[in-house]
Amino acid sequence: MATEGPQDNAAERGFENILTRQEILSAISTYCENPTIIKELRDKDGVYLLEVKGVRKIERDSAEYIYQRKGDFPNGSKSSVTSIMVVPQLGWPEIVSEYDAVTKKWIV
């Protein structure tokens, strides 16, 4: 007999898919050429913050890109979503993509 109730969905239970450094750099490379890592923070699960510098593909200027994983982290930071943010040299930070843990795809 089948039981009724919620299905076992890891994303809904709060478990986030942990991306590797290479997967993060691949996602950032969608927006940025020649990303150079300037800061990387890890916890027991893997990378939770990755800052890179590179050339924006469309604007052709230098910018910083920041990957932040969803969760609470040892450095005291918290994030409600996994995202990539761009910080242009002469502008304000802006989220360019969020990671959907259910579909395992980046949403622009």
Image (cartoon, rainbow, N blue to C red):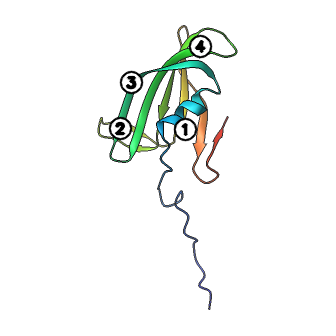
According to the image, label 2 marks what residue? Answer: 42
Q: Residue at x 67, y 16 (%)?
A: 57
Q: Earlier in the sequence, mark 3 or mark 4?
A: 3
Labelled pair 3, 2 in contact (Cβ < 8 Å): no
Name the residue type under label 1: Glu
Circle number at residue 43: none
Task: Say which element carries label 2.
Answer: strand
Query: Distance between the Cα atoms at labels 4 and 1?
Result: 19 Å
25, 73: nearer the viewer? 25
According to the image, label 3 marks what residue? Answer: 39
Q: Residue at x 46, y 40 (%)?
A: 69
Labelled pair 3, 1 in contact (Cβ < 8 Å): no
Total numbered circles: 4
Query: Distance between the Cα atoms at labels 1 and 2?
Result: 15 Å
Query: Distance between the Cα atoms at labels 4 and 2?
Result: 25 Å
Question: Image height check: is 17 above or below 77?
Answer: below
Q: Earlier in the sequence, mark 4 or mark 1?
A: 1
Q: Residue at x 70, y 15 (%)?
A: 58
Q: Earlier in the sequence, mark 4 or mark 2?
A: 2
On screen, residue 81 versus residue 32, left or right, reads left
According to the image, label 1 marks what residue? Answer: 23
Q: Residue at x 48, y 41 (%)?
A: 20
Q: Which x, y percent locates residue 44?
A: 33, 47
- Label 2 Cα crowd, 10 Å radius (few <14 / some 14-19 / many 20+): few
Task: Say which element carries label 3.
Answer: strand
According to the image, label 4 marks what residue? Answer: 55
Query: Distance between the Cα atoms at labels 3 and 1?
Result: 16 Å
**In front: label 3 or label 1:** 1
Farthest residue to the right: give it.
Answer: 58
Labelled pair 4, 1 in contact (Cβ < 8 Å): no
Name the residue type under label 4: Val
Q: Earlier in the sequence, mark 3 or mark 1?
A: 1
